[in-house]
Image: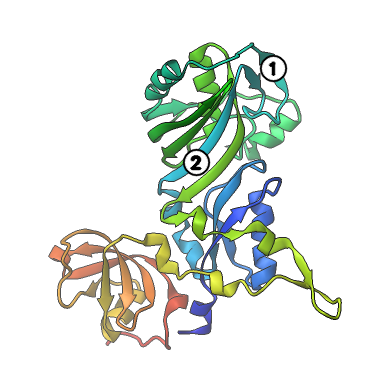
Amino acid sequence: MSGEAARSGILVVDKGRGATSFDVVAVVRRRLGVRRIGHAGTLDPDATGVLPILVGEATKLTPYLVDQDKEYVATLRFGVTTDTHDVSGRVLSQTPVEELDAARLEEACRAFVGPIRQVPPMYSAVHHLGRRLYELAREGIEVERAAREVLIRSIVIEKVDGPRATLRIVCGKGTYVRVLAADLGAALGCGGAVENLVRWRVGPFELRDAVPWSELTERREDAAGRRSETPELWPHVQPVEAVLAGWPSVRLDGASAATFCHGQAADVIPAAAAKEGFVRVHDVGGPMIGVGELMAGGSKVRPVRILHADRPRTRVLPA
C-alpha cells in the first residue's frame, strides 16, 4: 500500500463532554500528523459518544457517512424549557412534573416517528447570511428559520424516572435531538430539555469500537518521570472502505482501474452481480479506489468519486 493510502482512514472517537467537534479534529490532526482531517456530524459540546474522524482520502467520503442513520440515547427532563433546548441553557419556563405518565409519553413519541419537520435551534451550526446561528444567538439575535424535513426511524422508551425519561432514538441526517426534546415537552404541555445525550452509532460505527477521549488527551509519565502522550493512534484507524460497509463492491484489473482513476467508465469483468446502483470500487489487489455507479447491466462502472491516494502503485495511463 502506498504511503498516502496508509495515511488515510477512519478514526472513531468517543468525544468527551465539554469538547467541541472541532477540538477533536484538532487533537487528531496533531496526533496523527495529517493535515487533511474532518468529522462526520457535529456533536454538541455537552454531548458524548461516536464522532467519526475522516483522515486523508477518507474525507472524500464524508457525504456518504453523513447521510447514514445515527443512534442516540438521550435523557430528557420534562417540566423545563431553555433557550438551547438542553439543561445548560437559560431557563425560560418551569412546570412542576412529579411523575411522567409513561403511556402518555409513549403516545406522544409515536407522533414523532417517521418524516417530521423541525425548526433548527438558534444554538446550532446552521448558516444564516454567512454566519453560524449560534454566533447570532450569543449576541442575543434571533432570526426566522425555515422548518426542515427530517426522518426519525424509531423512538424506544428505556426508562421513566420521575420527571425524566431515557429514550433510544434512531434518526436520519439533520435531526436535532434537542429540538425533539422541546417538541415532545410541548406536546405533553410541560416543556422538555435534554439533560444527557450520548451518540451510540453513526452508520456502521458503534460506541463500543470508539477510542476513548482520554486516550487522545491524557499524558503519561514513564519510569524516569518524562511526560508523553498516550500510545500511537494509527492502529485504531480503520480503512476508508469501512465508511461504506455493507455496500456491494467490484474489483478492477490494472487496465480497468487506471481507466476508472482517469475519470472514465471502466469495464467490469466479469459483470457485477448487481445491474445498477452505487458500489465500492477496489483495485484487484484490494485497496478501495473510489465510488462508482454501475452501467450497462453491471458490465461497466462510472466514476462518482475517486480516491487517487489509495492507489497502491504508480498509475498507468489506459491504452
Q: Which mark is residue 184?
A: none
Confirm or deny contact between disc 1 and disc 2 (CB under 8 A): no
Q: Position of residue 306 (x, y in %)?
A: 40, 69
User: Dot 2 lies on which element?
Assistant: strand
Using a 10 Å C-alpha cutoff, classify the residue at mark 1 as few (fewer than 14 neighbours), some (14 to 19) or many (20 or more): few
- What amino acid type is highlighted by mark number 2? Tyr
| Nearer to the camera, 241 or 283 | 241
The CA distance from mark 1 to mark 2 is: 25 Å
Q: Position of residue 84 (x, y in %)?
A: 65, 28
Residue that carries the numbered disc 2 in the rendered image: 72
Using a 10 Å C-alpha cutoff, classify the residue at mark 2 as few (fewer than 14 neighbours), some (14 to 19) or many (20 or more): many
Q: Position of residue 252 (x, y in %)?
A: 27, 78
**Looking at the rendering, in which quadrant would you find the N terminus?**
bottom left
18 is higher (above) or lower (below) than 34? above
Q: Is residue 119 visible?
A: no
| Nearer to the camera, 129 or 140 | 140
Q: Which mark is residue 92?
A: 1
